[in-house]
Image (cartoon, rainbow, N blue to C red):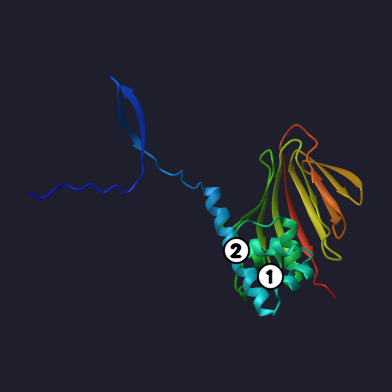
């Protein structure tokens, strides 16, 4: 008679209890690892895309880790972690690496082939979430041109009490900002300007600047960034 076999493909949780002087193992349920959320999957895709692009560009320019790290002003360890997909870089780090590699941020996070078409359509799933605040705020790159003469459009959400301090962009960089909800506190060169819903601002951001939500309601604004190619 052939003996029955049992194949177990998933771990099973068990509970050991004492019953009438004996220890009895009670099977409870199958222990399944937590599934990845959509945000986790998007983050993994972003990490893989950035890692591949930086590796490709670094090699094509004949740059070592040390050389690129020095040129971009980032730590070598940070660069190694990025290429090994052990973390997603901050917006500041992406900007520094893009400038050092003579490309745009869009080239790093959502590279597309150069096209001569009059219109290039970009779907919602192609937008890249590049910053998440402590209270639920987000910064999403909706679309961007290829560098080094860079044009980008961003969607920002800052919850009450959230802020973002940005690093200096390349010389001549300008941002066009339109607030759709809430109140924006825009700080450039240590001077803070309040922009209410329905208002807009044009800012030179080749200097220290920051965005903050000083109100009690969520802040939402759209931002267009133009960073000209370095001369």
| Image location of residue 24, percent across then percent down | 30, 28
Q: Callout 1: 10 Å neighbours few (<14), some, many (20+)? A: many
| Image location of residue 226, percent across then percent down | 78, 63
| Image location of residue 119, percent across then percent down | 61, 68
Horizontal placement of 215 versus 17: left or right?
Answer: right
Is residue 201 in view from this perspective?
A: yes
State which mark lies toward you, 1 or 2: 2
Horizontal placement of 111 versus 76: left or right?
Answer: left
Q: Callout 2: 10 Å neighbours few (<14), some, many (20+)? A: some
In depth, the one of 7 and 168 nearer the eye is 7
**Residue displayed at 83% across by 63% down:** 173
| Image location of residue 96, percent across then percent down | 76, 64
* Residue under label 2: 84
**Residue displayed at 35% across by 46% down:** 10
The image quadrant that residue 120 belongs to is bottom right
**Farthest residue toward the left?**
1
**Residue displayed at 85% across by 55% down:** 203
Is residue 118 in view from this perspective?
A: no
In depth, the one of 128 and 88 nearer the eye is 88
* Vertical side of 196 occupied by 208: above or below: below
**Residue displayed at 92% across by 48% down:** 190
* Residue under label 1: 146
* Vertical side of 180 occupied by 170: above or below: below
The image quadrant that residue 130 belongs to is bottom right
Spatial CA distance of label 1 from label 2 is 24 Å
Under circle 1, the secondary element is loop
Q: Earlier in the sequence, mark 1 or mark 2?
A: 2
């Amino acid at each position: 008679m052939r003996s029955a076999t049992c194949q177990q493909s998933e771990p099973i949780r068990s509970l050991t209890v004492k019953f009438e002087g004996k220890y009895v193992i009670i099977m409870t349920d199958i222990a399944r690892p937590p599934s990845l959320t959509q945000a986790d999957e998007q983050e993994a895709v972003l990490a893989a895309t950035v890692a591949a692009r930086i590796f490709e560009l670094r090699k094509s320019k004949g740059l070592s880790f040390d050389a690129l790290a020095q040129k971009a002003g980032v730590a070598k360890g940070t660069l190694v972690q990025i290429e090994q997909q052990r973390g997603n870089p901050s917006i500041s780090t992406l900007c520094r690496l893009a400038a050092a590699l003579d490309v745009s941020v869009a080239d790093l996070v959502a590279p597309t082939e150069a096209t001569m078409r009059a219109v290039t359509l970009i779907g919602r799933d192609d937008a890249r979430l590049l910053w998440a605040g402590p209270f639920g705020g987000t910064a999403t790159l909706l679309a961007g041109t290829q560098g080094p003469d860079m044009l980008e459009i961003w969607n920002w959400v800052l919850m009450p009490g959230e802020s973002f301090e940005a690093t200096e962009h390349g010389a001549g960089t300008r941002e066009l900002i339109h607030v759709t909800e809430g109140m924006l506190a825009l700080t450039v060169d240590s001077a803070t300007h309040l922009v209410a819903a329905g208002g807009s601002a044009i800012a030179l951001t080749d200097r220290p600047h920051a965005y903050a939500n000083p109100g009690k309601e969520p802040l939402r604004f759209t931002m267009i960034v133009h960073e000209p190619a370095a001369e």
